[in-house]
Image (cartoon, grey):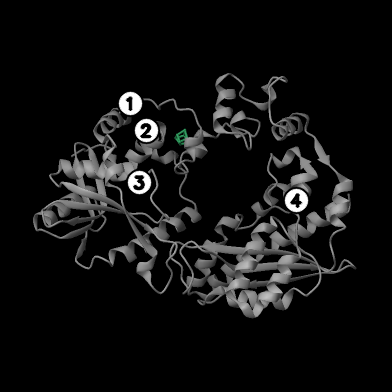
Amino acid sequence: MPSSKHYLTKSKFLSGLQCRKKLWLGVNHPELATPPSLKQQFIFDSGYEFEDIVMKRYPEGVLVEFEKLDRMVSITNDLVNDNAPVIFQGAFYHKGVYVISDIIRKNQDGTWELKEMKASTGVKDVHFPDLAIQKYILENNGLYVSDTYVIHIDTSGNLPDLNSMVGVEKTTANVAEFNVGEVVNNFQELIREETEPDVMIGEHCTKPYECEFKDYCWKDIDEYSMLNFPRMTWKKKLQFYSSGIRSINEIPPETKLTDNQQDYVNRLTNKTVDIDSEAIKKKLSELEYPLYFFDFETTQRAIPRWEGIHPYQQIPFQWSCHIMQENGEITHEEYLHDNESDPRFGLAEALVNTVGNTGSVIAYNAVFESNELKKLADAFPQFADRLLSIESRLWDQLDIFRKYYKDYRFGGSNSIKRVLPVIDPELDHKNLELSSGDEADVYWYMMLDETDPGKKAELRNTLLEYCKLDTWAMVVIHKHLDSL
Ligand code: SF4
């Protein structure tokens, strides 16, 4: 067994398939990786919840606890020799490669079924090499694999029936197509190389997984780089790049671009701001007072906590609403669900009691609020009329920035996170402890699970502050648009 760091594991093997440099860095310079974000950690943890559900389907299973790989291999070997019918997290080693298999199950004829648990909503291409490397190592240990399976999340299921959320697909044929041995030899040579492989950044930096070395590899790529050109295919970006055009300033004037791409180039190179004040005025004239500036925070969880909710179903748990009267007076209302029950009823009830029967409801990317309001109306018929009335009065502030207001400082995006700091540099989400909407639900679950009242209150305040800034940002943007 290898004494140095130069061994492969299943995850290193998959890293190498995504990018040779990712594999090399992972083995030789793991310190350059960006640690997982709170959100990524939350997603990993949701995966463990799913695994617990699946493992309960095999009461005869024996778990090999995580510890040093060689020790896990030895324990697994003992279990196989003792005729264990099902082994969870069995570890195997062969010529410099370790794999840990989620579930192996012995058939009556002495062959084994290999099952990989994935908290995804179906089988993905990346699962085939994942199973193929396991099959290869198991068979080199004398365990013949009859069939391979992916056990994934079935989004048609719901609580309280845990089994309804588990789907199984046989992948034997796809896995058999993969030639593992040759790739393993190639990767084993690669990880021993002295110097970092020269790999161009590209689409593979985010597909099939976000690479943990992205901050390192992309550190010199600024917003003028062709590689950061928004809404351009990777094929086209790389064509420019490899022909020597590294920055948008270097694009020859005769180059054929789409109208939107050309607009973006012109704006960034000339540092221009295009504002169609007349169109904005006309659009604003559609609004009726009182104005409700409104935003939901939502969550999607692999294994839902409440009955009737499907895996990964999006549900709201918080809203914020700034209300502006015609005389300019502004008040603020909010709702944050803070106990263990399904958040939707209390949230919907508070909402219909806050938003009146008249007045425009301003959201940023209103299609999102529209969907959530319709789903709430479906779930709670007693509030349906009033929820659908709110939905029918939605007015999208994002439309202005899609059509009538372009600023080179938005960097080709029109998200509120890019627009706000340009319109009001003091008001930036980055100044908040919770600076990304992605992590709001992570904070929410932390708050629900927190037992220390002081820490719970702090988490509650953090969430309220974040969501309030989102709707205050819309007020600030509205005032700015109104003043043009
Ligand atoms: S960021 Fe991209 S180029 Fe760099 S190691 Fe990751 S996948 Fe490879």
- Disc 2 versus disc 4: nearer the observer: 4
Q: Nearer the viewer, mark 1 or mark 4?
A: 4
Which circle's residue, 4 or 3, is located before the other in the chain? 3
N-term-proximal mark, 2 vs 3: 2
Which label number is shown at residue 127?
A: 3
Mark 1 to mark 3: distance in Å?
28 Å
Q: Is residue 466 visible?
A: no
Q: In the rendered structure, which disc, 2 or 1, sits on the residue that comes first in sequence?
A: 2
Instruction: Give the foreground label among 2 and 3.
Output: 3
Among the 4 quarters of the image, the one containing residue 252? top right
The alpha-carbon separation of the residues under discs 2 and 4 comes to 45 Å
The residue that label 4 is drawn on is 399
Q: Secondary structure at mark 3?
A: helix
Marks 4 and 3 close (CB-CB < 8 Å): no
- Work out which quarter of the rendered image holds the N terminus and state it: top left
Which residue is labeled 2 in the image?
Answer: 24
Of residues 279 and 141, the one nearer the viewer is: 279
Task: Name the secondary structure under disc 4.
Answer: helix
Horizontal relation, residue 28 to residue 342: left or right = left
Disc 2 residue type (three-letter)? Trp
Residue with the mark numbered 1: 193
- For image coordinates 38% across by 50% down, the residue present is 123
Q: Secondary structure at mark 2?
A: helix
C-alpha span from label 4 to label 3: 40 Å
Q: Between residues 291 and 416, which one lies in front from this camera angle?
A: 291
Q: Is residue 174 above or below residue 246?
A: below
Measured in 3D between alpha carbons, the distance from the residue under mark 2 to the one under mark 1, in whole angstroms, is 8 Å
**Front in this rendered view, residue 416 or 214:** 416
